[in-house]
Image (tube, rainbow, N blue to C red):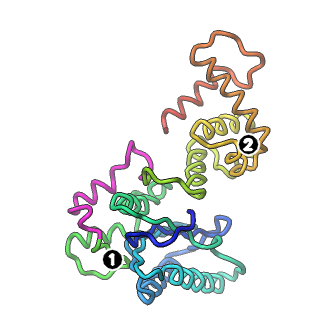
Amino acid sequence: MQRVWRTVTGFYHVCARGVGKQLIFEGDEDRWEFLELMRECCREAGVTVIAWCLMGNRVHLVLADYEDAMSAAMHRLLLTYARRFNKRTGRTGHLFQNRFDRRSLDTDRYLMAAIRYVHANPQEAGIALIERYPWSSFAEYLRAYDNDTTRGFSDPSCVLELFESAKGFLDYSLSMPDGSDPVIHDMDETEWERRAFADKMAKRLGVPLNELKTVAPSRRDGIVFALHDGGYTVREIERYTGISKSTVSRIVRAYARVNAQAEGSEKKMAEPLLSSDSANKILKIWDKYY
């Protein structure tokens, strides 16, 4: 996420990630400790936790910050938790990747989409259904609609009217646009978001992004072309995968020729990297998911 200044609404989507994809939670004890620290640090700073989700190597939050106190609260939270985690596990060094990322949520629509995105993380990662994942504020929202005063780690009261009812909240949360990501539309994608989506795209095609450089060219090339066809530039693919710019460019050009042939050109290509059948298989995979 890009660094932003105070939003006109006071709402932010915040993400903190483990350095080098380091796991930041090794068990439920770690998660409970993080949540208790989060509640303490935010309460003392006057920051309200609107929604949260704890994943293995990252944390997503939606926060309300009207006094520009979020930076201090997050710095204290992440530093304190990292120190305790390192002491408990015997590791040293930074636990979190640089500073936390934040994005301003300047309309109700962006706020609603961010809450849905935060709660949908475990389902999009293939870990658990949204409604069955225990380490998010999803259940706290349902209790709030049911007037259950059980104390949680979030305070959804100020946004409940946006969804109107528990049914409205469920319908909005569980029905993703086109069955895909609950993305925040009409907002510029930030670097970490683009990389995260590229990684998910690569995994759906069979190879994690960080392993793409090491697999056989027959598998690598199709995924590289799919990334480029999905809107990623040659330089972005080079940066995300470690594959050289010249190799990426060659793959893109070769697949573009095969694609053109598959769409109706009867002219035989000179020494294509892939047959038209192979190209069509890649395109079918692409169409299935995207």
Residue 35 located left or right of residue 93: left
What residue lies at 50% left-to-right and 55% top-to-bottom? 125
Residue 174: within the magenta?
yes
Rendered location of residue 166, percent (x, y): 23, 63
Q: In the image, which disc is placed on residue 133?
A: none
Q: Nearer the viewer, residue 188 or 198?
A: 188
Q: Which of 254 and 189 is in front in this view?
A: 189
Kind of element beneath mark 1:
loop
Q: Is residue 233 above or below residue 130?
A: above
Quadrant of residue 22 in the image? Answer: bottom right
What residue lies at 33% left-to-right and 50% top-to-bottom? 175
Q: How crowded is mark 2: few (under 14 residues within 10 Å), some or many (20 or more)?
A: few
Kind of element beneath mark 2:
loop
Q: Write down the residue under mark 2.
A: 215
Return the residue found at the far bottom. 44
Residue 135 appears in view: no
Q: Write down the residue under mark 1.
A: 155
Quadrant of residue 61 in the image? Answer: bottom left
Rendered location of residue 114, percent (x, y): 41, 61
Q: Residues within 10 Å of mark 1 (few under 14, many from 20)?
A: some
Residue 170: within the magenta?
yes
Helix, strand or loop for the magenta stretch, by majority: helix
| Amino acid type indicated by mark 1 | Asp
Which region shows up in magenta? 159-182
What residue lies at 70% left-to-right and 24% top-to-bottom? 274
Between discs 2 and 1, the one toward the N terminus: 1
Q: In this view, does 211 lie above or below 93?
A: above
Return the residue found at the far top. 266
Residue 179 located left or right of residue 76: left
Q: In this view, does 274 lie above or below 232?
A: above
